[in-house]
Image (cartoon, helix red, strand yellow):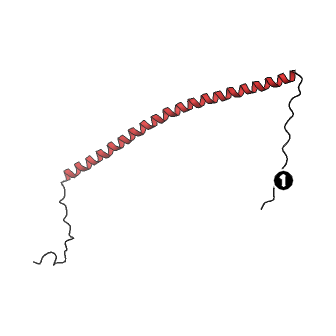
Amino acid sequence: MPPPAARGQGTDATVRKTPASPASTKAQRDHEAEQRAQLQRNRVQQHDGEQAARAAVQADRAAQARVRHAETLKAADERRARVEKSKADAAAKGHPPAAPLPAPARVASSPAR
């Protein structure tokens, strides 16, 4: 019988692995599945923690925004009261009310180009 190289089979022939036993293959698949499940549980746990942190920050921001809004409303009310008092004082002293603003000038629109 001629050597393998002489029959047309070169050195590039590969040796097949011996088939693993079904029990070891199943055990390996089960182990990989458990690892994937553990990774997924870790991701879910991390996501839940991040969501809780975001919710806490959001609640704090909302409270601060409510306080700022209340302060803005209070300042606006104080400003209105101050203006009304100023107008009343001016009227009591006999000063005429301020003249209204002039109407805006009509601007001729330029022709379309």
Q: Quadrant of residue 75?
A: top right
Tell me which residue sits at (86%, 23%) in the image: 91
Residue closer to the observer: 62 or 75 = 75
Q: Estimate the x, y position of residue 24 in percent, counting from the top left.
A: 20, 51
Quadrant of image for the C terminus = bottom right
Q: How many numbered circles does the render carry?
A: 1
Q: Is residue 93 left or right of residue 55?
A: right
Query: In the rendered image, which residue does mark 1 sit on?
Result: 108
Q: Estimate the x, y position of residue 90 in percent, counting from the top left.
A: 85, 24
Other-residue count near label 1 (Cα within 10 Å), few / some / many at <14 / 14–19 / ≥20? few
Tell me which residue sits at (36%, 40%) in the image: 42
Tell me which residue sits at (52%, 31%) in the image: 59
Q: Is residue 23 left or right of residue 82?
A: left
Disc 1 is placed on an element classified as: loop
Residue closer to the observer: 52 or 95 = 95
Q: Estimate the x, y position of residue 4 in percent, counting from the top left.
A: 15, 75
Residue closer to the observer: 14 or 107 = 107
Q: Estimate the x, y position of residue 35 in percent, counting from the top left.
A: 30, 45
Quadrant of image for the N terminus = bottom left
- The amino acid type found where label 1 is placed reads Ala
Tell me which residue sits at (75%, 27%) in the image: 80
Task: Look at the picture and state if 24 lies above or below 89.
Answer: below
Q: Is residue 101 left or right of residue 17?
A: right
Q: Is residue 52 left or right of residue 61?
A: left
